[in-house]
Image: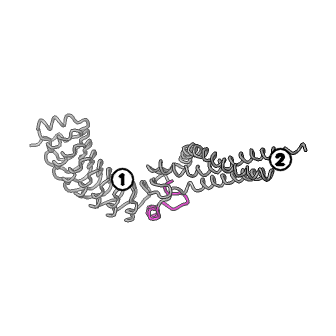
Amino acid sequence: MESAPQPAADNRLARIATAIAAGLFAATVDVALFTVLGMVIFAYFVNTVSFESGGTIALAVDLLCVAPLALLTAIPVGVITGRIVSGRLALVASEQGRPAQRKAARAIAGGIGLSIVLVVAGFLAYPMLPVIPRPEREVLAQLGIRPTRQSPCRQKNIACSGFVFRAHVTEVKITRRSITSLPPDIARLSHLKVLDLSANKLRSIPPEISRLSRLEVLTLYRNQLSQIPPELGALPSLKSLRLDNNQLTAIPPELGNLSSLQTLYLNDNRLGGPIPPELGNLSNLKALKLENNRLGGPIPPELGRLSNLTWLDLSGNQLSGPLPPELSALSELDILRFANTGVCEPQDPTLQAWLSGIRHLSRTNLPCP
């Protein structure tokens, strides 16, 4: 008769054990789930700018940023879920007594096991993210980026942006790889902003490059290019164009349509003929380097419309005629070089005063007759 209260004590103990077990089960599962979810959210919001390569460092940064998010979201969800599950298990405990404790132990083991599986799966999947479309992977393969189990966006010379499961290539930097051709399929990289294939062996630029409407930086110096396709002037977002140290023979006037262009490097080529006056339409241009070519004729006065120009180098050409007085309107010009040319300097007081105010000046000192 004295042992009658024992089942009630066992039931209370069982309810406490099941509540703890349920809370641990819910918390471990939630931490695992929200860690994976947190990595996806972090990749989307932060790497919308760029999925930069970084290997172990990038992974460590990701985890450090994700861990607080995972804990903050897992704790309240774990508490709520734990209460619901503990209520169910407590009902079972009140009816079955000690067998409920065995269920609690199995719940703890199951939660921990599932958490381990999810975390391991996340670490295995991490190198394969972000995922880029197949056409973009094929273009990268044509450029020598071999397909591997690791996402191309994890490589040092590739950057991507977008959602972790649907990213796009935004930067390609492949230098000193002896690449001989730029495939026409480069147009498939519709989100490309930076293309750097300098110090290769490229011989031509495909006209299809004009379809890269987001391209901002095109760097192709130290190749074997002989022509600039007129289609290059159809890139509305292009800000930097470097084609120096090639074998180019002419400047297409279509380059004057690059309204966003800020730097234009065409130095150290074989450019001949006159400087196209259309270059005076590049209202945002800050640097124009045409030195060490075979350009002839007079300096076009239209260059005086480049109000943002800070660097103008025309030295080492076959230019002739007087220095245009219109250049004195270039109030931002800091570097002017026209030495080793046949350009003469008018004795106009306004022009001479302007020349004396330029910090870095390399001139011919040839007075005009």
Looking at the rendered image, the quarter that the C terminus falls into is top left
Amino acid, disc 1: Thr
Q: Residue at x 50, y 55 (%)?
A: 164
Q: Residue at x 45, y 54 (%)?
A: 162
Q: Callout 2: few (<14), some (14-19), or many (20+) C-alpha neighbours within 10 Å?
A: some
Q: Residue at x 63, y 54 (%)?
A: 118
- In this view, the residue in front, 138 or 297, is 138
State yes or no: residue 139 in magenta.
yes
Q: Which residue is mark 1?
A: 219
- Asked whether residue 181 appears in the rendered view, the answer is no
- Asked whether residue 345 appears in the rendered view, the answer is yes
Q: Quadrant of residue 176?
A: bottom left
Q: Which residue is mark 2?
A: 7
Q: Which residues are magenta?
A: 133-154
- In this view, the residue in front, 297 or 207, is 207
Spatial distance from mark 2 to mark 1, Cα to Cα?
81 Å
The single residue placed furthest to the front in the displayed view is 1
